[in-house]
Image (cartoon, rainbow, N blue to C red):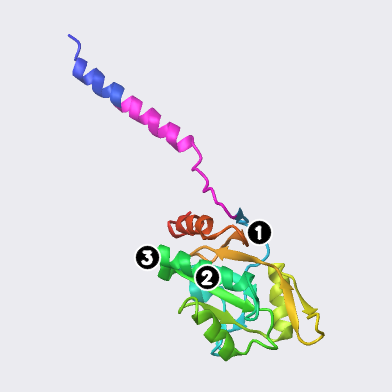
Amino acid sequence: MFNWASIDRRRSVLALGALCALSACQPSQAPSFASLDITGASYAQDFALPDADGRVRTLADFRGKVVVVFFGFTQCPDVCPTTLQELALIKQELGPDGARVVPVFITVDPDRDTPALLKAYVSNFSPDAVALRGNADQLQATAKAFRVVYNKVPNRSGEGYTLDHTAASFVFDPKGRLRLYARYGQGPQPLLADIRQLLRGA
């Protein structure tokens, strides 16, 4: 006499094993980002610049957090304040997780952006934002490492100058790995979604 219960149990075990094997063969789904995914890029690996208090900062100081690096200057009329404001909105939207996102602002205008000015400027957007300021040689080396360009443009009046510079952000995951290149002008929502994925371990 057949033991139908035993046969059914064996069938269930075999079916479960086949399902597990099939799942193991399927590649994990890669994250889909709104920003440009540059995971594995060989550039923009780190920085070593003094902050507004004179302490040299590197990516290692921010392990466990998403770091958003942006190059700009305090007299920038639109791109820089817009970017910093959007990052502040993103941190606010994340709630408690917002503390795990650090904006890092690297000035391309060290001649005019004093440490005190930089500290006050970034604090207007996020109290925990970090401003970095190197000398001309340090800035040049860091910009080259990030493939960032900047250029002085004299004002039409002939007095003073402004600066053209790369208007994008570099996003590092909590392990300190370069992951995303966020172009200026996409608005805060796409980057918010990307950062949420990175905070979840994507």
Residue 103 in the image: state x and y as whole percent.
Answer: 53, 72
Q: Secondary structure under badge 1? A: loop
Residue 52 in the image: state x and y as whole percent.
Answer: 56, 87
Q: Nearer the viewer, residue 15 or 109?
A: 109
Q: CA distance from mark 1 to mark 3?
A: 30 Å
Disc 1 target residue: 41
Q: Secondary structure under badge 3? A: helix
Disc 3 target residue: 95
**What residue lies at 55% left-to-right and 82% top-to-bottom?**
121
22 is within the stretch colored magenta: yes
The type of residue carrying mark 2 is Gln
Residue 57 in the image: state x and y as whole percent.
Answer: 56, 81
Residue 146 in the image: state x and y as whole percent.
Answer: 68, 68
Of the image marks 1 and 3, the number of the one nearer the N terminus:
1
Disc 2 target residue: 85
**What residue lies at 36% left-to-right and 30% top-to-bottom?**
17
Of the image marks 3 and 2, the number of the one nearer the N terminus:
2
Q: Give the farthest residue toward the top.
A: 1
Q: Give the farthest residue toward the left.
A: 1
The magenta stretch is: 13-35
The type of residue carrying mark 3 is Gly
Badge 1: few (under 14), some or many (20 or more) residues near its Cα, within 10 Å? few
